[in-house]
Amino acid sequence: MPPTILVVLGHPDSGSFNHAIARVVCHALQSQGWRVVFHDLYAEGFDPLLPSAEIAEHGPVPDDVRRHCRELAEADGIVIIHPNWWGQPPAILKGWIDRVFRPGLAYRFEEGDGGEGVPMGLLKAKAALIFNTSNTPDPREQAVFGDPLEALWKRCILDLCGVKNVRRRMFSVVCTSTPAQRENWLHEVNQMTVELFANPENG
């Protein structure tokens, strides 16, 4: 299996800046020699609802979700792209996390731990990039909301699953941005992607 980066996009509008980010990310990775596994969750109609039967580690998982699980487990790096909606990812992306970051695959608890302890991360990926968009000015985001997506991705999800090198960039304010500003942002996306995932041979 060649070195692989999993890229996951969660935005319903195909003309969005999030989609532009995804295109730049995929092109940058491929130009560096990475194999890219890309999922546009809305375009694919991913079902975000977690059935109760799937919660257990060995619960039944449908084939399409099992494929997502396998791709996550095999990925050498991860890129997530989504807007900031109410300080959270869109529901479809949160459902993807619920169904794909499974116990026994993304994390596990020590033997004898009933689930109250700190999990052990299992993911192969050593690094992740998170790109977010927002219509809240950064000073207000930091002062009023405390940037909840920073804690969510870095401390509440990826670190607990074994991904320690996590870089994140929030682009704002998107709704009033100019074409020139968006071009500069996309250049930054390209640079961050190339810098973090510079050498596929080293994973």
Image: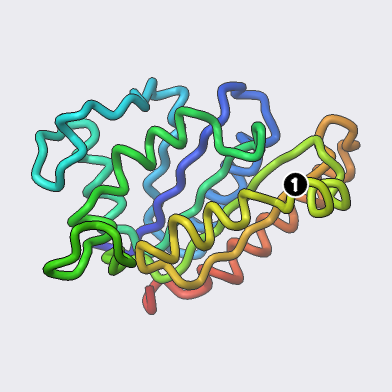
Q: Position of residue 19 (x, y in %)?
A: 61, 34
Q: Position of residue 42 (x, y in %)?
A: 47, 24
Residue visible at 59% across and 38% down in the picture: 88
Q: Nearer the viewer, residue 83 or 194?
A: 83
Residue visible at 22% across and 31% down in the picture: 64
Quarter location, residue 114: bottom left
Q: Is residue 117 left or right of residue 27?
A: left
Quarter location, residue 66: top left
Which structural element holds mark 1? helix
Residue visible at 18% across and 34% down in the picture: 54
Q: Nearer the viewer, residue 9 or 166?
A: 166
Q: Is residue 118 left or right of residue 105?
A: right
Q: Is residue 23 left or right of residue 45?
A: right
Q: Where the C terminus falls, by quadrant? A: bottom left
Q: Is residue 153 left or right of residue 55?
A: right
What kind of residue is marked 1? Phe
Residue visible at 89% across and 43% down in the picture: 180
Q: Where the N terminus falls, by quadrant? A: bottom left
Above-or-below relation of 144 to 168: above
Q: Position of residue 153 (x, y in %)?
A: 52, 54
Q: Position of residue 22 (x, y in %)?
A: 57, 42
**For mark 1, what is the residue?**
145
Q: Nearer the viewer, residue 178 or 170?
A: 170
Above-or-below relation of 18 to 70: above
